[in-house]
Image (cartoon, rainbow, N blue to C red):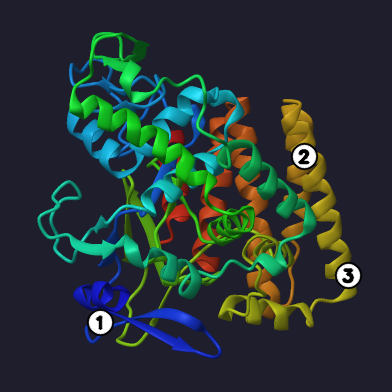
Amino acid sequence: WLEEFFMGWGVVLSSSPQLGRHLCVGSQSKQPGDLLFSVRPFACVLRPQYHSTHCRCCFKKLDFASSEIAACKHGCNYAWYCSDSCSDLDWLQWHEGECIALRRWSPSVLNENVLLMWRLLHHRRRLHQPVLGHSNRSCGDNSNSVTMPTTLYPALAADFLISHIEDYDAQDIKRFTFWTTKFIQIPTPTSVSTPASVSISASTSTLTSTSTPLSADARSRAAFQEYSLAAWATETTETIVSLFCMFFCNNFTLYDSKPRSLGIAVYPPGAMMNHSCYPTCNVAYEGNVAHIRSLTTLAPGTQITINYIDIDDVLPARRALLRQVFHFHCECSRCASEEQTQFLISPEIERMVLSVDKLRFEGALCRQHQDWEAALAAFVEASRLLAAPSNDRIESYLDNKRAAVLNELVDVAYALKDWASAKHYCQNALSCFEKVFPKYWPQTALRWHKLAKIE
C-alpha cells in the first residue's frame, strides 16, 4: 500500500544500502512551496495540557462561543470536540478503545506516549484507516481518500518501521516497561458494571447503574469497552515495549502556527523520509494532517528530506541528539561540510568558541532567574567575541553560533522592552540565518514575523 500511496502523489519510495528506505521526487520537478504529499495520522493524541482547549479529533482550537462544542458522549469527561461530527469520527477511529481507560485513570498521571499507545493498540485491530489521497481537496474532504488496511499493520510494524530496541539504554526500557505494566496490561476494571447493568445517560454524559434493560446498541458498546481494555492485556510485555521503542523514534510532533507543540502522531508514510540538517522539505500541519512541501527547487530523483530535530544548533549537539533519540550518526551534506571545517579551526578560535559557550550558559541561567541585565551582558560579550574576523572557510560555522547568540539577544531585549536593540539584533540574526539555512526555512520566516512585531 505504501508504493500505491506514493505513486498517487508522484513520489518514489526507494531503498539503498547507504540511505536505507527513502523518498525521492518523481518524474516532475518541484518548485519552492509545492505540495509533495499529505497524510492523515494512523494515530494521534493531544498533549494533556491541550485536551480541554483543542479538538481531540482534528486538533482545531475550540471556540467556546460556538454551540457546536461537544464533550465525549460516553462519560470520560476528558475528550472535547469542535463538532458532533468530530466526536463521532474520533469514537469510530480511536476514542472507543480509550474512553473506559480514561475513566479509570486520572489524566494527571498520564502522558502523551501512553495515550498514543492506547490509540495504536485499539486502532491496530480495526479493519481500515483512511489516509488522505492525492487530490488537492481540503483536509476535511475524504472523498479522494485511499485505504490503508490495518490488517497489514503488524507487518508494517515488523517490516517498515524499525524499533532500534537494541539501541535504547536500560533506563529507557525500564520506563517503557513501567508504562506497559502500569497503564496498559491491566485487567478489566471491576468497578465497571456488566453490560446488563450499565446505561449511558445522554443528559449527564456518565455511566450510571440501572435496572432498566439496555438497548442492543448500549449493551454492544459497553461490552466492546470491556473487551477493548481486556484485549490490551493479551499483548505481551515484550511486544508493547518493542512498540514503544518503535514509535518513540518514528513519531512526529504536531505544531500549530505559533508554533506550539500540540501533540504527537504516527504517520507511517512520513516515517519513510530521511533526516537532513539542510532539508529539502518541510512538514506543516493543518490540524492533524501533515503536509510535506518543498523548500527549494527539486529536480526529478532528488531525495525528499526533513529535519528530525531543531537544526539551529552546532554539529556536536545535533549529532549527539540524533544518536540519542533516533539512533543514527548523521552524515548529511551540512554535517560533512562542518566536520571538514572543524579541522580548519585554529586553537585561538577553539578557545574563543569555548568562551562563547560558557557565556551562553551563564546567560541562559540568568534568563531562568529573569535577571535580564546580567543575561544581556553575557550575550553581548558572546556576540562581541564572535564578531572577530576569521578564516572565510569557517564563516558558516561561526554564523551558526552568531545566529544563536543574536536570537538570544532578541529575546532578552524583548523582555527589557528595548525595541531599538531588539530590532537591531533581529536584523543581524536574520542575516546569519539566511546564510546558514534554506531560503524558505520556516524558522527564518518566524524571525521575519518577530521583526515585524518589533517594528
Disc nearest the viewer among 1 and 3: 1
Quick one: 217 or 437, which is closer to the camera?
Answer: 217
Callout 3 environment at 10 Å: few (<14), some (14 to 19), or many (20+)? few
Image-quadrant location for residue 119:
top left
Disc nearest the viewer among 2 and 1: 1
Gap in angstroms between the C-alphas marked 1 and 3: 46 Å
Image-quadrant location for residue 365:
top right
Q: Residue at x 30, y 54 (%)?
A: 40
Q: Which residue is drawn at 20% across and 50% down?
A: 139
Amino acid found under the numbered disc labelled 3:
Glu
The residue sitting at the left extreme is: 143
Amino acid found under the numbered disc labelled 2:
Gly
Image-quadrant location for residue 403:
bottom right
Q: Which mark is residue 363?
A: 2
- The answer to whether the residue labelled 2 contacts the one labelled 3, judged by CB atoms less than 8 Å apart, is no
| x and y percentages locating residue 103 in the rendered image | 46, 23
* Residue at numbered disc 1: 29
Query: Which of pointers 2 and 1 lies earlier in the amino acid sequence?
Result: 1
Gap in angstroms between the C-alphas marked 2 and 1: 45 Å
